[in-house]
Amino acid sequence: MTHNMRIFLTLLVPIVLLSGCWDKRELTDIAFVAAIGVDKAEDGGFIGTFQIINPGNVAGGLQGGSGQDSSTVTVYEIYGDNLTEVSRQAASEISRVLFYSHANLVVIGEELAKEKGIASFLDALDRDDRFRDTARVVIAKDTSANNLLKVSSPIDKIPANKITKTLEFSEQQWGEQWPVNIRELLNALSADGREAIIPSFKYFGSVEEGERMENLQSTAPETVLKADSIAVFKKDKLIGYLHGEEAMGMAWIMSNIHETTIGIDWEEEKKPISFQVISEKTKVKVAMKNGKPTVFINIVARGELGEVNIPVNIEDYHVRKEIAEKAMRRIKEIVQSTITKSKEYQTDIFGIGEKLYQNDPDSWKKLKEDWNEEHYPELEAVVKVDVSISRTGLRKNPFTYEK
């Protein structure tokens, strides 16, 4: 290599490495979207709601507590015939380019989910390479997505984070709600023999109070957001909800219980004993039995005693065995009630048909067309639960027990 060529390459490499990005954007030109909401407009179009982060106020709030005098987010409401048009129409109100990489939440209005369905706008989100398919999805129960996204949260400075974190902690500690993202939802909507589910949120109080800075700064907020139930879908439309133990029963079947508590009745006392589940594993199998589909659900749960508010001898093996048997029957009741509810809705939210297709595709081909309306409601469910008590806590017998 000649001397001149070496000099040329030495000068060329830094120029290539230090060249600027052709599509760069300044931070002052970007609006960071924390969450989007989608509602049905009266004329059949869509109302998009954008919860946009005010970076300076978020930073100030993190450093100085709850004393900031302006909101950490701004909410914009945009109309369009479809989601692409909504996103582009936002340019007429928002002076910056929408940046979706930080958007971790999609809120769907209840009316939209019931009447129009959710497939069309989810397709738009999935096609947009700016939007992450790991974003969580929730239903705004008894209200619009617009109203839900307007309510401020005193602990989590960004309201969207309040919703996603609540779902995560509920999944870990209780089991009645858990996060569902766009990809999981699209997989359910496109699967044979499985219907979609989405967690729901609602607000308690008034939207007007929830929008005010006083709600953000108050020690007892007038308006709060709470996880409520699991929304049940048929095809892509909302048809009902699973509440309380019905939602927990679904978590048991899906092997989605990390920790939870089972209240146990004892003689005349109502739930004086609490069994704290610390691990569980569920296996679900589907087979044809006498020409009809049967699902076999086998649950193994391990836990410890959280409370014992009656005078019983916990050191007695027979007492611990009876407590375990009562917990077993209680879990079985919860699971059976969830299955019964899903049969009433005529929607296979557990993916039993999908498992039948995997195990016996010929039988599924015969049952597929009328599965939800005819065969699923007649499904036989065999539920088996095995419970073991691994620990009794820091003490054995309760204070009230006398030998």
Image (cartoon, rainbow, N blue to C red):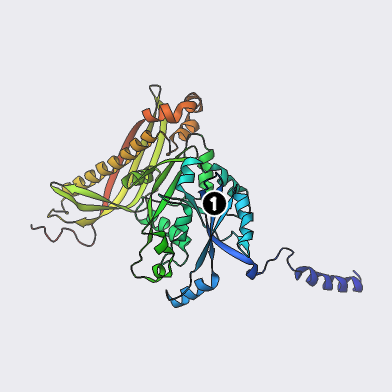
* Residue lying farthest to the front in this orientation: 43
Label 1: few (<14), some or many (≥20) within 10 Å?
A: many
- At horizontal 19% and vertical 47% (from top left) the residue drawn is 265
* Residue lying farthest to the left in this orientation: 403
Rendered view: 361 above or below 117: above
Rendered view: 269 above or below 206: above
Residue 393 appears in the rendering: yes
Q: State the residue in front, 347 or 81.
A: 81
Q: Secondary structure at mark 1?
A: strand
Residue 196 appears in the rendering: no
Apparent side of residue 54 relative to residue 169 in the rendered image (left or right): right
* Residue lying farthest to the top in this orientation: 290
- At horizontal 54% and vertical 63% (from top left) the residue drawn is 52
Q: Which residue is mark 1?
A: 47
- Pick the quarter of the image with the N terminus: bottom right
- Pick the quarter of the image with the C terminus: bottom left
- At horizontal 24% and vertical 50% (from top left) the residue drawn is 263
Q: State the residue in front, 96 or 253.
A: 96
Q: Position of residue 166 (x, y in %)?
A: 41, 58
Amino acid under disc 1: Ile
| Total numbered labels placed on residues in the image | 1
* Residue lying farthest to the bottom in this orientation: 64
Choose top left, top right, bottom left or bottom right for residue 219: bottom left
Q: Position of residue 392 (x, y in %)?
A: 23, 56
Q: Position of residue 210 (x, y in %)?
A: 41, 63
Q: State the residue in front, 312 or 351.
A: 351
Choose top left, top right, bottom left or bottom right for residue 340: top left
Q: Position of residue 282 (x, y in %)?
A: 38, 43
Rendered view: 357 above or below 267: above
Apparent side of residue 8 relative to residue 315 in the rendered image (left or right): right
Rendered view: 105 above or below 188: below
